[in-house]
Amino acid sequence: MSTLAVLSALFLLLQCPLLSLSTNSEGKALNALRRRLSDPNNVLQSWDPTLVNSCTWFHVTCDSNNHVIRLDLGNSNISGTLGPELGQLPHLQYLELYRNNISGKIPEEIGNLKNLISMDLYDNQLEGNIPKSFGKLKSLKYLRLNNNKLTGSIPRELIHLKNLKIFDVSNNDLCGTIPVEGNFESFPMESFENNKFSGPELKGLVPYDFGC
């Protein structure tokens, strides 16, 4: 065998463990999520924790490097809670969990997903505050949290999301005032209806958490 062939084979051997380690860590994160969920329709049946590569699982989409970039579990009749393991999917771009019966709080760790473009958690039973860590999601364009049981005020960290095009928190139990800075000045009032907001924020006159 030539020196070039030996070096090529060695390079591949060195790369494979790195790839397996990456995909396996994401697989572990997804499997941890699965353990939190009740799945009466068996939509997660293909999520086999013994497989190194989770890219073969249904409802999971990967890129050419076998990194998980989409999680599509909308309208799947699943229930349970979300956990910090979601923050261990660093390449995730689309988190689609809408129209289920997911309850509990939204994990702060989702704010670590710097590549996230779309997060659809609407039509669930989520409660608690909108995490302030969402202000770190600089790539986020679509955030739909409507039709849940969320409380507290809208984090002012969200006004710095310059790419945010759609924001919907209607039909929750939120309070305080509606931001008027950044892209919030362009969101329709329908995005905020059926909450306990005191109206638009009056900077310097009324605190953002007024009425909470």
Image: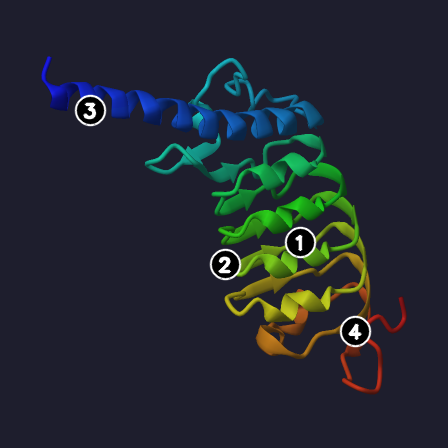
Residue 184, image x, y percentages = 62, 74
Q: CA distance from mark 2 to mark 4?
A: 25 Å
In the rendered image, the vertical position of residue 174 relative to residue 180, given as above or below: above
Q: What is the crowding at mark 2: few (fewer than 14 residues within 10 Å), some, or many (at least 20)?
A: some
Q: Quadrant of residue 30?
A: top right
Q: Residue at image x 72%, y 54%?
A: 131
Q: CA distance from mark 3 to mark 4?
A: 61 Å
Q: Are marks 3 and 4 in contact (CB under 8 Å)?
A: no
Front: mark 3 or 1: 3
Residue holding disc 1: 145
Looking at marks 4 and 1 on the same chain, the residue that comes earlier in the sequence is marked by 1
Looking at marks 3 and 4 on the same chain, the residue that comes earlier in the sequence is marked by 3
Q: Are marks 2 and 3 in contact (CB under 8 Å)?
A: no
Q: What is the crowding at mark 3: few (fewer than 14 residues within 10 Å), some, or many (at least 20)?
A: few
Callout 1 amino acid: Leu
Looking at marks 2 and 4 on the same chain, the residue that comes earlier in the sequence is marked by 2
Callout 3 amino acid: Ser
Specify whether 14 is left or right of 43. left
Nearest the camera: 175 or 170? 175
Residue 189, image x, y percentages = 67, 73
Residue holding disc 4: 177
Q: Which mark is residue 8?
A: 3
Q: Quadrant of residue 102?
A: top right
Callout 2 amino acid: Ser
Q: CA distance from mark 2 to mark 3?
A: 37 Å
Specify whether 64 is left or right of 4. right
Q: Are marks 2 and 4 in contact (CB under 8 Å)?
A: no
Q: Residue furthest bottom?
A: 205
Split into 4 quadrants, where in the image is the C terminus? bottom right
Q: CA distance from mark 2 to mark 1?
A: 17 Å
